[in-house]
Image: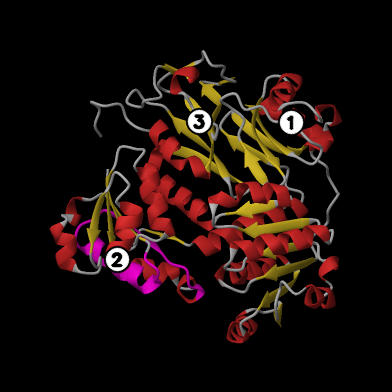
Amino acid sequence: MKIAIAGAGKLGVKIAEMLTGGDHSVTVIDKSEEIINRYIAPLDVMSVVGNAKEITLLNEIGIAGYDFLIATTDRDEKNIVISSIAKKLGVPAVVARIRDPEHMDQIEFLMELFGIDSVVNPDLSVAEEINKYLVEKYTLSNGVFYAGTATMLEFVVSKIPKLIGMTTEEAERELENVRVAAISKNGKIHIPGSGEDITVDEDDYLYIVGARDHIEKFAKKVVERGKYTDIQRVMIAGGGKSGFYLAKLLEKFGASVKIIDSDKARCQYLSTHLSDALVLHGDATDANFLHEENFEDMDAFISTTGFDEENLLLALMAKQAGIEDVIAKISRDSFGDMIESVGIDMALNPVDIEASHIHRLIQGNKIITSQILQGQAEMIQIVVDDRMVLNDKTVEQLRLPEGIQIAAIQRGLEVIIPDPETVITAGDRVIILSQFSDAFDLEKLLKTKKGFFG
């Protein structure tokens, strides 16, 4: 596939890195030669210094022959215009990053008017993942995810005390006929595999995959009914777009929301655009200020400021205050170890989440089911055809990295929990667990064998 990316910011670079693992010819366009040289030149992609709004430039690179254009510049208006021009010049599918709430309120009209096929919004996606975690937990979601006959279940380890202290491999043998596909430990998702064996602790969450009937029977033992009725009090630090979207979602659910921002003008905006949330002008890192606002009485605390370090600090303060659910927006993969040491419940990277959405758009009908796990990993189900590199290979021959695991194979009505010698064949429905940080390797796994086209 030929794919053009307009804008070499964090999202544009992430998408380019991911796509170099697959069967794609990628071109990245950015006005800054310095950014192109620093972030794009080291990648195996074509780079163009220039303005993607210029029709002459797009014609020079033969944009009409591309399959996708993805506009990820720093401004919504630019992305809308670039996408619209590319569509008029013959690109079959155009994707625009659009973030502003004012645009999202009329997004269907804008998409139809400008010929935009898909929209990605990192801030809204983060808010939706956080809202889903909080609301589904407090409304007794059973944590069961269906992918045909194969099914995945999420549960807290304390529901099965005999698993505490076991390794993930031992837990898998104890549970029988399932695969421990992932484990969430102190807010960080791990995917066992390639020799990695993780000790299971009481507060960890396990994600197990198996046949539907077996998992549904198991779910009856571990899903607790009636523990929660609703979520009452939520505090959000950071009134930017992510915080704003989240406050609106929680308002709709019926939670009492306090949202803090240090910028007075932003607070005025929030006050006029949120119906019921209490908007507070202040410094969220000021312990005295938080105490005055009954910080310790919150059911959940979410830090969505523009600074990772501040979000981690606030999350640590919230955990030390005994708040049950603590979530942070973190944009740097390098902070993974710090996330686990802080012990927060969930950490989300908006760039990773949105790159995953774009990956699913590009793969099209290759991916027939997907489910995001705590904003850090995803379960996908694919149907193998004889053109894929997966076909006619054993699991061992695929040499999967630590962050990717083949959890189950559905062959007809049978669900197979694969071992290293299991051969994947055309027609199999394969469930793959992958961390977002391993998007490049996942793309390699979905490649077509050389010599096949289509």
Q: Which residue is mark 2?
A: 32
Q: Amino acid at mark 3?
A: Pro
Q: Secondary structure at mark 2?
A: loop
Q: Amino acid at mark 1?
A: Thr
**Residue nearest the viewer, comparing 1 with 30:** 30
- Relative height, residue 435 to residue 168 (above, below): below
Q: Residue at x 74, y 25 (%)?
A: 171
Whether label 1 touches label 3, CB < 8 Å: no
Q: Which mark is residue 199?
A: 1
Categorize mark 3 by other alpha carbons within 10 Å: few (<14), some (14-19), many (20+).
some
Q: Quadrant location of the C terminus?
A: top left
**Residue nearest the viewer, comparing 42 with 104:** 42
Dot 1 or dot 2: first in sequence order is 2
The alpha-carbon separation of the residues under discs 1 and 3 comes to: 19 Å
Location of residue 344 in the rendering, given as x and y in whole percent from the top left corner: 72, 52
Q: Which residue is mark 3?
A: 401
Tell whether position 88 is magenta.
yes
Q: Residue at x 76, y 56 (%)?
A: 325
- Left or right: 343 as drawn, with respect to 382: right
Q: Secondary structure at mark 3?
A: loop
**Residue nearest the viewer, comparing 158 with 385:** 158
Q: Amino acid at mark 2?
A: Ser
Dot 3 or dot 2: first in sequence order is 2
Q: Can residue 211 be seen from the camera position used here?
A: no
- Left or right: 58 as drawn, with respect to 170: left
Q: Quadrant of residue 19?
A: top left
Location of residue 339 in the rendering, given as x and y in whole percent from the top left corner: 66, 51
Give the magenta part as a residue range.
73-101
